[in-house]
Image (spheres, rainbow, N blue to C red):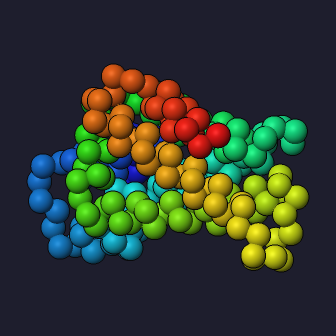
Amino acid sequence: MVGERGATPPVSTCTNSPSSWSSRRPSRRHRASLFRYFGTKEDIVLGHLEESGRRIAAELAARPDDEQPWEALRRALDVLTRINESAPPEQVLSCLRMLQETPSLRARHHEKQLSWKKLLVPELARRLGADPDRPEDTRPSALVGAALACLDAASTAWVACEGTVPLAVLLDRAMGALA
């Protein structure tokens, strides 16, 4: 159950989605084997998001230290926009539509993005000179949460406009509104 491109399928392509599987119904034995690798049905589609979060965090850590934290977050999210641009648009649109229209997938996606927050906040705190032992300094968490909300708004707009405007442009607009 891995994507066509290797063990970690791209974020936007949903290569693990049920629509990419054979039309035959899996046997009980195969379903049991499948759930050895995936905890839930939603993880079959969204399991690759953990790796995406790690890639975004690595990109954020690699950004220049003198770059403003908000701009560094925006550029780190280019990990996702590059993947989006490299995949067939109809496949990405189909995947994101499914994600937006299926309540259980949307909820699980939100949960996965919250795990990204745990990866991104420490680096943003470092960039802000915030003391990680002072939880009352909400700036790093607020900025990461806002950036992820902008990503969600951009993705929703990208699906609504049928991909006619690049995701990177929509993300620039969303994040620019808060800059």
**Vertical position of residue 166 compared to residue 66: above or below:** above
- Would you say 156 lies left or right of 169 here? left
In this view, the residue farthest toward the top is 164
* Residue at 31% across, 61% down: 105
Residue 74, position as x, y percentages in the image: 63, 39
Where is residue 47, by image quadrant? bottom left
* Residue at 78% across, 41% down: 68
Residue 125, position as x, y percentages in the image: 79, 60
Residue closer to the observer: 40 or 161: 161
Residue closer to the observer: 8 or 50: 50
* Residue at 75% across, 55% down: 124
What is the quadrant of the C terminus in the image? top right
Residue 110, position as x, y percentages in the image: 43, 62
**Vertical position of residue 82 compared to residue 20: above or below:** above
Residue 6 visible at all: no
Residue 172, position as x, y percentages in the image: 55, 32
Residue closer to the observer: 173 or 19: 173
Q: How many marks?
A: 0
* Residue at 63% across, 56% down: 144
What is the quadrant of the N terminus in the image? bottom left
Residue 105 visible at all: yes
